[in-house]
Amino acid sequence: MTVSNSDPKVLPESKADIGFDYLRRILLAPVYDVAIESDITHFTKLSSRLGNNIYLKREDQQPVYSFKLRGAYTKLSNMPKGDCTNGVVAASAGNHAQGLALAAGKLGIDATIFMPLTTPDIKVSNVKRLGAEVKLVGKSFNEAQIASVEYATKHSKKIIHPFDDPDVIAGQGTVAKEVLQQNPNLDVIFVPVGGGGLLAGMAVYIKQLRPDIKVIGVEAEDSACLKAALEAGEPTTLSEVGIFADGVAVKRIGDHTFNVIKHFCDEVITVTSDEICAAIKDIFEQTRLIAEPAGALSLAAINKYCKTSVGNESLLAVLSGANMNFHTLRYISERCELGEQKEAVLAVTIPEQKGSFRQFCHALEGRIITEFNYRFSGKAQADIFVGVRIADTIEKDALIQSLENQSLTVCDLTDNELAKLHVRYMVGGTNTTLKNERLFRFDFPEYPGALDNFLNTLGELFNITLFHYRNHGAAFGEVLAGFDVESKNLPEFFSHLETLGYQWHEETENPAYKAFLS
């Protein structure tokens, strides 16, 4: 079956035809006009620790520090010249924007990139430096995307999709072509997934030439749109996505990408933010490179995979990008030991009497305390927030059992997001007067007027009883807020939450809140 590279609407349907068509597209992709053949790094230290041979495909070495350049340039190169006369348009908050800007500049095509108001200045300035016009519109990617479509229609410009396009998929698939040339003796290849362009392109190429190599897609646990699509049998839209690994924060897998992935991908693994932080640390220790969270997904999955693997396999992770916002490093440093499962976070109830602290420290049997928070409350018992250095989860379980055997009440908060994001910084006294306090976590957009919007929508109508804000360099900050709301006013309160339009989670029943703040 013959399909023109310039006509993505005419596509094959059977697995064999899909495989042949994309193999041809990938082999013909002209990516090396702008991209380089990135290196593969052997992680000797990590290989020894995990009992497998670990390799990293270094797409951080591209001129825009990510693989996105490959797909953008392939798409523009294969477009008829008449389609580019008026220029091209895209909506992006990061890597696609930079890849398209460089590709368009190389081909002499005008490019306009719509970016949300929340986009960090470093990314905006990079896109402008590469020659594209930037329009900052909307408080979210979706708003920027809607504006980009309206603009493209009005000015007869072509939209360049970041992942859901056959030529873009083919360009990303050239990563797999290099991998098989550089190291043909691999057993498993791990590929990060946002919209699915990289996984689709790599999987379809690998399975045509080396069907014995296992291909595993890797998603952030809080942005698992591919996993949801595979379970539903078709692309489905997530109600919300996580904000930490923003490079893969996609609510819906692409139609084209899903049609390829469902045939050629062997498995999908999800990883947590803490596991991603641990992988970023592993990459830094081996290469002195700081990967962005989305870029470290695949290595996080390898760490997870090796816990149950037979060992002595050759495993490769694709490092998809290194466009890291510097201020995110603080958050990563805090969380990497949790991701490595080397810190336990506990709430422990001890007697409120002299000598209790010393007795508690003795109960830890020499383990290193990483954090200790306490505030006198005048009660017969005291709740302490403590971090303890451990070797693994087995030691954590043994520690908890040991403390309970000594008549101490222990609550494991190691996987409690409220405790790790907010409570550990707020331990200082509980509320003894408010009977109708309800607690909520918000993803707070980082744009001028966000706080005013919050206060105008909620603060003028309901008494704010608690407020804690943290930002770790993302487009969104983490806000914890308490409100004094009587039961009869709850319908009105939740109605205003919907009007506010921010992602939120109620935490009123969270044990960390009950122990230290309620």
Image (tube, rainbow, N blue to C red):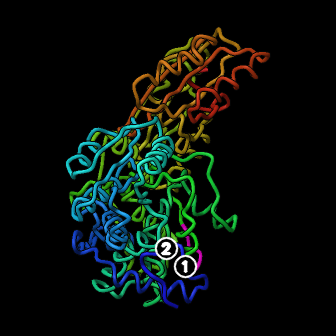
* Amino acid at pointer 1: Leu
Asked whether 234 falls inside the magenta stretch, the response is: no
Against 350, residue 459 (above or below) is: above
The residue that appears at 47% across and 78% down in the rendered structure is 203
Report helix, strand or loop for mark 1.
loop
- The residue closer to the viewer here, 126 or 375, is 126
Asked whether 265 falls inside the magenta stretch, the response is: yes
Q: Quarter-wise, where is residue 33 in the image?
A: bottom left
* Lateral position of residue 482 relative to residue 147, left or right: right
Report helix, strand or loop for mark 2.
loop
Q: Quarter-wise, where is residue 46 in the image?
A: bottom left
Residue 11 is marked as 1
Against 274, residue 207 (above or below) is: below
Q: Residue furthest right?
A: 488
Q: Quarter-wise, where is residue 267 in the image?
A: bottom right
User: Residue 291 in the image: x percent, y percent?
Assistant: 30, 56
* Lateral position of residue 235 relative to residue 358, left or right: right
Against 199, residue 335 (above or below) is: above
Residue placed under numbered mark 2 in the picture: 8
User: Residue 279 in the image: x percent, y percent?
Assistant: 37, 58
* Lateral position of residue 329 relative to residue 405, left or right: left
What count of labels does the image hold? 2
User: Residue 286 in the image: x percent, y percent?
Assistant: 24, 63
* Whether label 2 touches label 1, CB < 8 Å: yes
The residue that appears at 47% across and 39% down in the rendered structure is 140
* Amino acid at pointer 2: Pro
Magenta span of residues = 262-268
